[in-house]
Amino acid sequence: MRYTPGYNPTMANESISSYHLVRHAINDPDVLPTIFSLYQDEETPLSSILNQKGMKTKGLYEGMNSGKYRTVGSNHIQYAIEASDVRKLHFKSNSTGVTFESSIYPTEPGKNQSAFYIYADSNWAGSKEVLELNDNNTQLYVYDVQPPQEVEPGVWRYEVKIITSVVGDFCNPALLTENSEFMPVQTAYEHDFSETGIEKYTFPTWGHAYLTLQRVKYSYSGTAQAMKEGKKWAIHNGARGFLTYAEDTMMKRAAQYNEFNMIFGKQSVSENGEVLLHDKTGREIMTGSGIMNQGDGAYEYPYNKWSKKFLKSLMKDVDLRVGADGVTECVLIGGQEATAGFSEVMRDYGITQNNNIVGEGAAKGINDTYAYYEFDGVRIITKRWRYLDGPRRATKNLSDGTSKSSWDGFIVPLGQTSGGDNQVELVQLRKPKTGTVSGINEGGDGMATSVDGSSVHMLFQCGVISRAKITRIFRPYNS
């Protein structure tokens, strides 16, 4: 969707106050993100690119119950999350505060092939499996023939031995600390008359997306109604419509509010489904989470300046997967300091000014702006979100005079899960509603008020599903 200049002076049988674009949205709830894409250059970088990539739900309706979506109500959708067949475990302290116990060698667990206990947050590992610790060198063998025992809620005990060919080796206790990762990597059975085998099953789980209802309006007096308003034509899939100046202002504000909700929105519903937020009259106010606040939240990376090292550490945690178009890509959305710093470090990878000269003679210039960068088989699309640059956002000023918010950014993967679902997608269920509250300026029997003026209202309800982990970058306030 895009704007086109001017308006058609030969238009006939079309009221200037008709709400052409939004009326189309009423017939198709999934087209609302397309309308908000009118403001993609400044206001809606995330929802616009998800819309352009087709990463939005289609055809959801109340009562739907498929293998991928369940609509619990007009404001609550459940979506299937594939269960990973690879699981990490973490060391977890028991009630006495220890993550391992060795009665024979308290500070040298496993020495001389002695058995010892470790405590973990999961029963995913089983008997006769080999566990690799996070130094990627030490391996422990699950010695007990019985399944791990849950010694207290959420804590499982394993009896293990160290795998080594050196007499006297033991496990470094520093590898057994709280939250340190380990995982099963293979099995090891006796060669003669071995019994049973390892069984593991993973099943999809269901995530919850709560939709936020928002409402905006614009008003006009009877005198203003009689005046000629400027109009902007918009075109979408060949269909032409227009927005008056007031309509465009209202739609722009709706797009701004929706974008904030898709990114930073916070959920007002507890884990057991209770709506915790109420207005003063006691009515429930349900809000849904944006991508930054879904699940356990985003990975956080504080930084002071972009560098190759920082970029590499950042990208290793991005959940990169191939998209529907066969490209592995993600989008970096940020304020000016974040996107400009990223572009600068990308130029360190070999982009030179000589490649960026455009034009001839005295009209030559340097175009240093790129739609995307690609390296190591990954395409990174950059989008500046002007909202983060300070004037429209409450923020702090740093000691160097820059806005803290301008350094903010986040990386969103644009691929698909192994089951073909979008990692991140826009979701909408309830159709947008628009209506006019008419005053005496309209005349007739349809007046709602005696005021010489009317107002146009719009209600819209949107949400977002994130099956991927989002990466957030920011500059600490004290830096």
Image: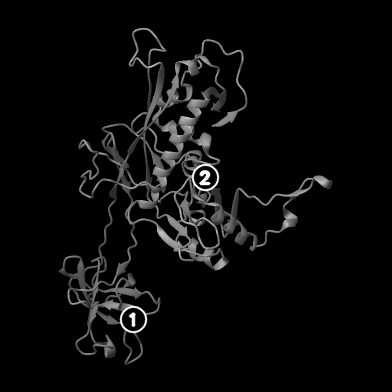
Q: Amino acid at mark 2?
A: Asp
Q: Amino acid at mark 1?
A: Ala
174 vs 232, left or right, is left
Picture quadrant of residue 137: bottom left
User: Is residue 58 placed above or below 84 in the rendered structure?
Assistant: above
Q: Which residue is mark 2?
A: 325
* Of 456 and 414, the residue lying toward us: 456
Expressed as whole percent of the image width and height from the top left, the position of residue 470 reads: 42, 54
User: Is residue 273 placed above or below 378 in the rendered structure?
Assistant: above
Q: Nearer the viewer, mark 2 or mark 1?
A: 1
Residue 238 makes an appearance in the image: no
Residue at point 23%, 50% (across, down): 271
User: Is residue 226 placed above or below 317 in the rendered structure?
Assistant: above
Kindly state the secondary structure of the residue where label 1 is placed.
helix
Q: Which residue is mark 1?
A: 174
Expressed as whole percent of the image width and height from the top left, the position of residue 154 reads: 20, 65
Q: Name the image colouring.
A: one colour
Kindly state the secondary structure of the residue where label 2 is placed.
loop
The quadrant the N terminus occupies is top right
Picture quadrant of residue 429: top left
* Of 231 and 151, the residue lying toward us: 231
Q: Are marks 2 and 1 in contact (CB under 8 Å)?
A: no
The crowd level at tag 2 (other Cα within 10 Å; few <14, some 14-19, many 20+) is: few
* Of 79 and 139, the residue lying toward us: 79
Picture quadrant of residue 144: bottom left
